[in-house]
RNA sequence: GCCGAGGUGGCGAAAUUGGUAGACGCACUAGCCUUAGGAGCUAGCGGGGCAACCCAUGGAGGUUCAAGUCCUCUCCUCGGCACCA
């Protein structure tokens, strides 16, 4: 083998061979699994954009490829599929811009993506490819919706929702970035309109609690906890007293939510959100109704952003003519409306405790309301004290610690303990063309009628114009022969629902479809689900923390509840992939002209080099900047691998018996251990550096046992499958290296027979020496003290103390 | 404001979890080789110092024979949530 490393030849050759031999085919069914354990490795499937891949995209795919190759060789049955998340606005906008049908655009982009991915030699089983826009796929997305509807978890609502004027559609809370549309950046408006909603909040407690069972990055779990926003508090009722109509309105009450019932004695006023429903009922009781109305109108006009900016000067209006009676001490408190209280959270009303809440404090200062200390420990003349302490000025409760008082005070006033969440219901309809039709029919007589299961899928009609209607309705309203149907119940005239599902629908269950991709009789067959579920390893971007990853968990739990799946959580382990930035440190984007195309890198350096480089760049979950300059390192590494194959082939026998050989063998076994553990832990950068160290030693050693070299090729093959396959065959093997067992390390050989002992004098490293492994403590200590370097520091003095750390170090204290 | 992840050479980063700080790689310097460029090979490469040595993991203290790692305080960067009672 005198030829030099020609990556193009090697890579295209083996990609052809692998395809021919179908080595990446998933074992067909559980019966074929031969009792082996399974490992389901999943990438977050991409949205096939028109721009193609840049070098950042494949990073996660390379990692799952390497990981699944490692698991396969370690004896697992692997499921490692790929597909396309192709519904949604970007595809639609691309289609509008390029004047082609969305379905055509998707086909074209998918073909391009696949072509680019295939250059990398990934071990996907393409027979299981799925596409969310495929009618055979979205039939089941619609089926899940019908189940949600059946169980009362999908419902119509007319509440004001977030409307993006740019995208011309309603959005869910999760689709917002602050008060802007996450996609286009437009400031969203509140718009009352008919919407389909999903009751995700019914699952809030389970979504929160089960996070603890997951092997996910702490940051993602924490982001979900924040998003769900659980807080425990109490509901407390304040009796309303009015100057007018005393007799008639005795039962008026204001219920507030508070997490600090212990501070009830310090409440000096109450505040209601301007949108609070009771206000209209109290119209007759409120003496300054005009003023109140004016304030409410003003608030309606303001955007969310203006209203919720923190640190904003507090505004509000006192309701004249009514008071609220503090149930703890009978004090009559003024009631305000103010926009710092949010209608959607809690009960939309609060008891204000200015002494112990910073917002109430600011409001009380401005409106010159009394500030009454009821928790000791702060200085309320300066600022609100929100910390822990003991109750004061609280009747019989004075002296009680805060934690205990929460429950006691609540009970005392007949309140209820209550848990609230920040999570809001999922706004599930979009007024756009390119999404799954919501499978519902509106009948004048029967109301909302679900499309019968047997009529699924409700196919998206082909249309000429799919631009948004501009009226807030989906463009589908104009497709009369699609919209007008007979009611499945009464056979009368009826209309189809024209809203479509959000982009997130298809991706909320796709991991199940890969298990049983062509099943037309069920979402997924029981036995297959039993074998392959749940996903063992899921890899993707952290940007999905509070969108896709919450929705998918919600749907999965629902599917569990209706008996469709066997596991409580869909993704056992999650790994975040860190972004690859451009060389200029910005995000890679056409806009900045800093995009690196993987095709070019593969052409110049080869797929294996690209793969090794991306895994070597740094910690996997960390973002780092691309550097074409640095890619030469991995390329040199592979060339060295290539070069040394020749030697391994030539020298069939071990040139034996030197201690050098023993050292190399020790390193070899250490390397197997290290690489195996590092791949399992997703520490690919150190796995590769470990292989580089071994290769450097192998080169220096001037001999190489074929066995050791072949073992090394196996360690490398998850990262560089083409070159290792070539060399594996070059050495006379005729199997695929992918089907070979992963090398095992020998624990006894990991430990070399000499120990390297470090000697410290007064905490500073002064010398190092080697001594046989058998040496005992005293032997090592005296050997250490005999070293001239050490004696120089110790001198004539008798050491105060000599510490021996087994097999590691001697520390001499003077 | 609350929560989370971080801060180590010119650069990307390692550090067996308290035990040689900077492995591995890039860049750089010198030499060899080459008609030359490139590639390759050899050596060097945190700072100071001729050297012996000294200093150095954002900063300040502390615990310890020994601290990048543990504790207290503090500064900065990135990410999530945020008038959520």
Image (cartoon, coloured by chain):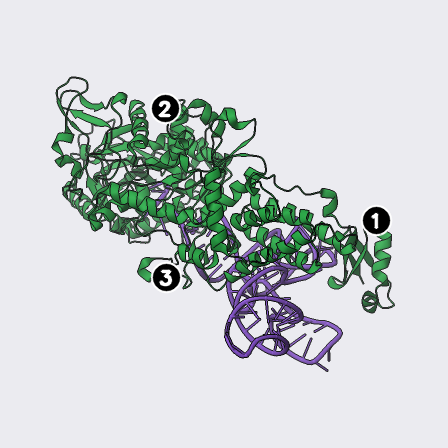
Q: Are marks 2 and 1 in contact (CB under 8 Å)?
A: no
Tag 1's secondary structure?
Answer: loop
| Chain A tint as drawn | green
Q: Tell me the CA gap for discs 2 and 1.
A: 65 Å
Upstream in sequence: badge 2 or badge 1: 2
Query: In the rendered image, is residue A341 in sight?
Result: no
**Residue A532 in picture, x, y percent from top left:** 48, 30
- In the displayed structure, A212 sits above or below A607; it is above
Tell if the residue under mark 3 belongs to the same chain as the one under mark 1. yes
Tag 2's secondary structure?
Answer: loop
Q: Which residue has dot 3 on it?
A: A594
Q: Nearer the viewer, mark 2 or mark 1?
A: 2
| Chain B tint as drawn | purple
Upstream in sequence: badge 2 or badge 3: 2
Query: Quick one: A505 or A16, which is closer to the camera?
Result: A16
Packing grade of label 1 (10 A; few <14, some 14-19, many >=20) is few
Q: Is residue A214 left or right of residue A747?
A: left
Q: Residue at point 47% right, 32% down?
A: A534
**Residue A127 in picture, x, y percent from top left:** 41, 35
Residue extending furthest toward the top: A490
Q: Residue at point 33% right, 62% down?
A: A593
Q: Which residue has dot 1 on it?
A: A774
Q: Which residue has dot 2 on it?
A: A522
Tell if the residue under mark 2 belongs to the same chain as the one under mark 3. yes
Query: Quick one: A60 or A360, which is closer to the camera?
Result: A60
- In the displayed structure, A669 sits above or below B12; it is above
Quadrant that contains the N terminus of chain A: bottom right
């Amino acid at each position: 083998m005198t030829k030099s490393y020609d990556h193009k030849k090697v890579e295209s050759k083996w990609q052809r061979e692998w395809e021919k031999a179908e080595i990446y085919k998933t074992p067909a069914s559980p019966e074929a699994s031969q009792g082996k354990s399974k490992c389901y490795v999943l990438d977050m499937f991409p949205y096939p954009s028109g721009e193609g891949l840049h070098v950042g995209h494949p990073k996660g795919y390379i990692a799952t490829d390497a990981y699944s190759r490692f698991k396969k060789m370690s004896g697992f049955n692997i499921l490692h599929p790929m597909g396309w998340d192709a519904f949604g606005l970007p595809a639609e906008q691309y289609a509008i811009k390029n004047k082609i049908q969305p379905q055509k655009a998707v086909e074209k982009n998918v073909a391009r993506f696949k072509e680019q991915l295939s250059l990398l030699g990934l071990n996907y089983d393409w027979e299981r490819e799925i596409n969310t826009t495929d009618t055979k796929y979205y039939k089941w997305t619609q089926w899940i919706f019908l189940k949600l509807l059946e169980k009362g978890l999908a419902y119509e609502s007319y509440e004001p929702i977030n409307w993006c004027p740019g995208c011309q559609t309603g959005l869910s809370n999760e689709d917002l970035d602050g008060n802007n549309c996450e996609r286009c950046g437009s400031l969203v408006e509140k718009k009352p309109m008919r919407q389909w909603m999903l009751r995700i909040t019914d699952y809030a407690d389970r979504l929160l609690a089960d996070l603890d069972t997951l092997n996910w990055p702490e940051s993602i779990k924490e982001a979900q906890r924040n998003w769900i926003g659980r807080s425990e508090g109490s509901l407390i009722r304040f009796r309303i007293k009015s100057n007018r109509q005393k007799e008639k309105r005795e039962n008026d009450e204001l219920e507030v939510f508070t997490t600090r019932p212990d501070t009830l004695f310090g409440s000096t006023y109450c505040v209601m959100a301007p949108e609070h429903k009771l206000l209209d009922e109290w119209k007759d009781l409120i003496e300054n109704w005009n003023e109140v109305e004016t304030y409410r109108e003003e608030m309606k006009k303001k955007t969310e952003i203006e209203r919720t900016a923190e640190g904003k000067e507090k505004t509000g209006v006192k309701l004249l003519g009514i008071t609220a009676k503090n149930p703890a001490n009978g004090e009559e408190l003024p009631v305000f409306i103010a926009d710092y209280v949010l209608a959607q959270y809690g009960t939309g009303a609060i008891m204000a405790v200015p002494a112990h809440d910073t917002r109430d404090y600011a409001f009380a200062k401005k409106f010159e309301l009394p500030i009454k200390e009821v928790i000791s420990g702060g200085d309320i003349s300066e600022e609100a004290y929100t910390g822990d302490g003991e109750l004061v000025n609280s009747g019989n409760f004075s002296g009680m610690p805060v934690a205990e008082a929460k429950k006691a005070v609540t009970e005392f006033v007949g309140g209820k303990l209550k848990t609230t969440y920040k999570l809001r219901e999922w706004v599930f309809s979009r007024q756009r063309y390119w999404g799954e039709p919501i499978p519902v029919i509106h009948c004048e007589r029967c109301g909302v009628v679900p499309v019968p299961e047997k009529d699924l899928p409700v196919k998206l009609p082909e249309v000429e114009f799919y631009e948004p209607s501009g009226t807030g309705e989906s463009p589908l309203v104009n497709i009369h022969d699609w919209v007008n149907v007979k009611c499945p119940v009464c056979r009368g005239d009826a209309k189809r629902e024209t809203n479509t599902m959000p982009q997130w629908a298809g991706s909320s269950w796709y991991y199940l479809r890969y298990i049983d991709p062509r099943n037309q009789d069920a979402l997924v067959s029981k036995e297959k689900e039993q074998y392959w579920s749940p996903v063992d390893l899921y890899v993707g971007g952290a940007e999905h923390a509070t969108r896709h990853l919450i929705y998918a968990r919600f749907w999965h739990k629902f599917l569990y509840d209706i008996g469709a799946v066997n596991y409580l959580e869909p993704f056992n382990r999650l790994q975040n992939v860190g972004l690859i930035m451009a060389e200029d440190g910005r995000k890679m984007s056409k806009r900045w002209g800093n995009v690196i195309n993987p095709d070019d890198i593969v052409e110049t350096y080869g797929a294996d080099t690209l793969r090794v480089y991306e895994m070597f760049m740094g910690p996997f979950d960390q973002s780092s900047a691309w550097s074409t300059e640095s890619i030469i390192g991995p390329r040199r590494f592979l060339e060295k691998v290539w070069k040394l194959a020749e030697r391994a082939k030539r020298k069939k026998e071990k040139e034996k018996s030197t201690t050098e050989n023993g050292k190399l063998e020790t390193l070899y076994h250490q390397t197997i251990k290290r690489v195996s553990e590092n791949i399992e832990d997703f520490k690919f950068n150190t796995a590769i550096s470990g292989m580089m160290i071994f290769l450097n030693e192998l080169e220096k050693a001037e001999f190489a046992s074929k066995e050791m070299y072949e073992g090394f090729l196996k360690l490398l093959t998850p990262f560089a499958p083409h070159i290792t396959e070539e060399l594996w065959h070059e050495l006379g093997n005729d199997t695929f290296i992918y089907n070979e067992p992963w090398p095992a390390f020998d624990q006894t050989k990991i430990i070399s027979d000499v120990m390297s002992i470090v000697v410290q004098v007064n905490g500073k490293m002064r010398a190092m020496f080697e001594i046989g492994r058998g040496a005992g403590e005293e032997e090592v200590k005296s050997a250490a003290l005999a070293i001239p370097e050490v004696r120089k520091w110790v001198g004539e003095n008798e050491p105060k103390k000599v510490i021996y750390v087994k097999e590691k170090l001697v520390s001499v204290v003077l």
